[in-house]
Image (cartoon, grey):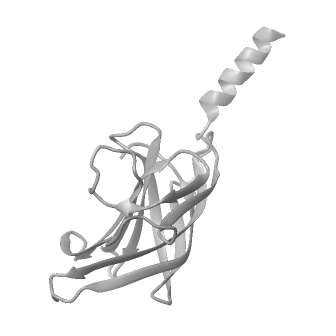
Amino acid sequence: MKKALFYILILICFSCGKDGKRCEGEATALLNGDEWKASNVMNPDAQLDNYFRIKFLTFDDIGDVEKKLSISKVPYKVGKYYLYRSNLFIGDSLTTVSLSQFLEGDQPIGAWGLDEEPDSSNYIDISFYDECTGEVEGTFNFTLSGRTIFTYERDTLQFTDGWFEGRICGDD
């Protein structure tokens, strides 16, 4: 009986995440009060065990990446995590956020990040995580500031009522 249970447990573990579901997810939010939608890809963090990252992507009319919103160093567990400026603390385990804008999919033309130290208004909240399938769901709120190469004025991007779902897949 113990041997049979052992083999069933091994079979279950090896079948985790092999159900053929898609790796892409979706996200919605209000961006400065207007509806915002993006697809997302979630991958394990290449530098830190026990963390993953989310890349929210929006596309232009011809299908090139227009903006990439990245949330890095997200723990593999349910919980609320305050966000820090991206690259401020390289090598640590603080959850970070940044946004890049592109021209024709590959030419960076703008960058946004957190201006201030973390506070309760800048966060990601993982409400569901399935260790076996890699499925994740959560919410987010934060305010970023930055600019494009076409203007010297700083711009504020406020993401509110954010929601996302998807699946952590593969390597970075």
Q: As drawn, which residue projects farthest toward the right?
A: 1
Count of numbered circles in the view: 0
Q: Is residue 134 left or right of residue 90?
A: right
Query: Along the line of sight, which residue is nearer the eye, 170 or 153?
Result: 153
**Dividing the picture into quarters, in which one does residue 154 lie?**
bottom left
Q: Could you tell me which quadrant the N terminus lies in? A: top right
* Closer-to-camera residue (84/171): 84
Q: Which residue is drawn at 34% across and 81% down?
A: 60
Q: Where is residue 171 in the image (x, y as percent from the top left)?
A: 39, 43
Give 90 or 28, whichever is nearer the viewer: 90
- Identity of the residue drawn at 78% across and 17% down: 5
Residue 151 place in picture, x, y as percent? 17, 89
Residue 152 image point, x, y percent? 15, 87
135 up-or-down from 62: above or below? above
On screen, residue 107 versus residue 59, left or right, reads left
Identified at 64% across, 46% down, the residue is 130
The x, y position of residue 12, in whole percent, is 68, 29
Q: Which residue is drawn at 52% across and 79% down?
A: 160
When the figure is inspected, residue 43 is found, relative to residue 157, above or below; the finding is above
